[in-house]
Amino acid sequence: MEYVPGIPILKPSIDADNKPFWDAVANHELVLQKCRACDVYHQPPRPMCPECKSMDTLEWVQSSGRGQIYSYVNFTTDRMAYPAMKVPYAVVLIELDEGVRLVSNMIDIEPDEIEIGMPVEVVFDDISEDLTLYKFKKRAA
Ligand SMILES: [Zn+2]
C-alpha cells in the first residue's frame, strides 16, 4: 500500500491506557495487555480487566506478532477510501495467536490476493520521525 504525498495520515489517539502499546510500536515491538489473575489478553488496552474486574493485575507482555486474517475490506475506488491512501488498498482485521484482534494494513501483497485465514506476522512501518505503525505481511503457514 502507498500513501498520497501531502495528505496527513491519521495518527493514533494516544491516552493513558494505550500509551505503553504505542511506545512499544515506536520501538518496533508489539505488546498486549494481559491479566495476571485470569490469564486473558485484552485489546484495546483498558484500566480494568473485563473478565475479573481487577484494576491491579494487568501487565504488558510481548506478543508473538503472529496470527491470521480474520476479515478484510478492499478499497478499490476513491469514493469511500481515506484520501491519504492510494487505491486499491485493504484494511485487515488480524486475529493474533493470543486471541485478540487488531485493525491494520498489509504490506508486500496486492489487496485482491488477501484471503481470510491467511497466516501473517507483524512488521513495523516508520512513516515519519514521530509516527510508526504496525502492519502485517503474509508468512508461511
Ligand atoms: Zn482478569
Image (tube, helix red, strand yellow):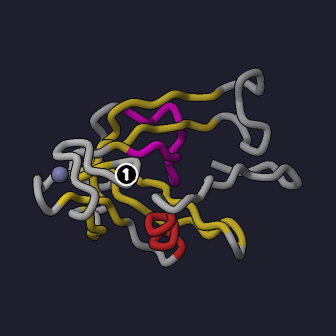
Decide which of 60, 103 is in the foreground and name it.
60
123 lies left or right of 116: right
Along the horizontal axis of the image, is 55 left or right of 26? left
Image point (56%, 28%), residue name:
74
| Residue 141 in view of the camera | no
Where residue 33 appears, as percent x and y from the top left, is: 30, 59
Of 8 and 135, nearer the camera is 8
Which residue is depicted at the point 25% across and 64% down? Answer: 56
| Percent coordinates x, y for residue 18 in the rendering | 48, 59
Q: Look at mark 1 in the image and give the residue it sits on.
A: 138
Residue 107 among those drawn in magenta: yes
Name the amino acid type tagged 1. Lys
Residue under the image location 42 percent in, 54 percent down: 137
Q: Nearer the viewer, residue 18 or 88?
A: 18
Residue sitting farthest toward the top: 79
Looking at the rendered structure, the number of numbered marks drawn on it comes to: 1
Residue 41 appears left or right of 135: left
Which residues are the magenta region? 102-115
Q: Is residue 91 left or right of residue 117?
A: right
Residue that protrudes farthest toward the right in the picture: 6
Where residue 4 appears, as percent x and y from the top left, is: 80, 49
- Whether residue 1 is in magenta: the answer is no
Q: Secondary structure at mark 1?
A: strand
